Image (cartoon, helix red, strand yellow):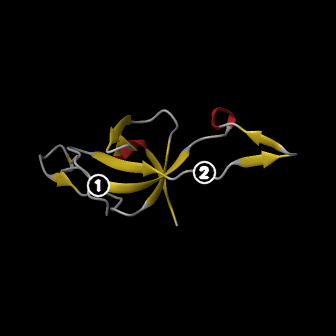
């Protein structure tokens, strides 16, 4: 786990994007803006958890270190020590990669 200076709260999750390799088709490099998303990311930190209707904290379905898919426009980007991270809600995670 990375030693980051931010602790998510509630059902938020801090992720670090996993850079995709440049796509080359027919000798043409496909720019990032034309690549299909969702984006692959690695979970760096979990928030404090979301409360259910009874006030109990619901456990996360993901864990630190999981590789996940998040939507291109999901979450809020933050920059910490020159590294880009994104804070997303657990509900914005599309799936866990095996």
The location of residue 56, given as percent across then percent down, is 13, 51
Q: Residue at x 64, y 37 (%)?
A: 32
Disc 2, SS: loop
Q: Nearer the viewer, mark 2 or mark 1?
A: 2
Q: Earlier in the sequence, mark 2 or mark 1?
A: 2
Q: Residue at x 60, y 51 (%)?
A: 20
Residue annotated with mark 1: 45
Q: Residue at x 51, y 53 (%)?
A: 18
What mark, if any, has residue 20 been given in the picture?
2
CA gap, disc 2 and disc 1: 21 Å
| Image quadrant assignment for residue 76 | top left
Which percent across, then down, holds residue 93? 43, 47
* Residue 37 position by quadrant: top right
Q: Is residue 69 above or below residue 65?
A: above
Crowd class of label 2 (few under 14; some 14 to 19; many from 20; radius 10 Å): few
* Corner quadrant of residue 34: top right
Decide: few, some or many residues near mark 1? Use Cα within 10 Å; few <14, some 14-19, many ≥20: many
Check the image and name the residue furthest to the right: 26
Q: Position of residue 22 (x, y in %)?
A: 68, 48
Given residues 38 and 26, the one toward you in this image is 26
């Amino acid at each position: 786990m990375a030693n980051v200076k931010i602790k998510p709260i509630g059902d938020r999750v801090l992720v670090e994007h996993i850079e995709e390799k440049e796509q080359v088709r027919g000798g043409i490099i496909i720019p990032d803006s034309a690549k299909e998303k969702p984006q692959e990311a690695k979970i760096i930190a979990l928030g404090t958890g979301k409360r259910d209707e009874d006030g109990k904290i619901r456990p996360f379905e993901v864990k630190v270190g999981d590789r996940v898919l998040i939507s291109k426009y999901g979450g809020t980007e933050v920059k910490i020590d020159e590294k880009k991270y994104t804070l997303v809600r657990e509900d914005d995670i599309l799936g866990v990669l095996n």
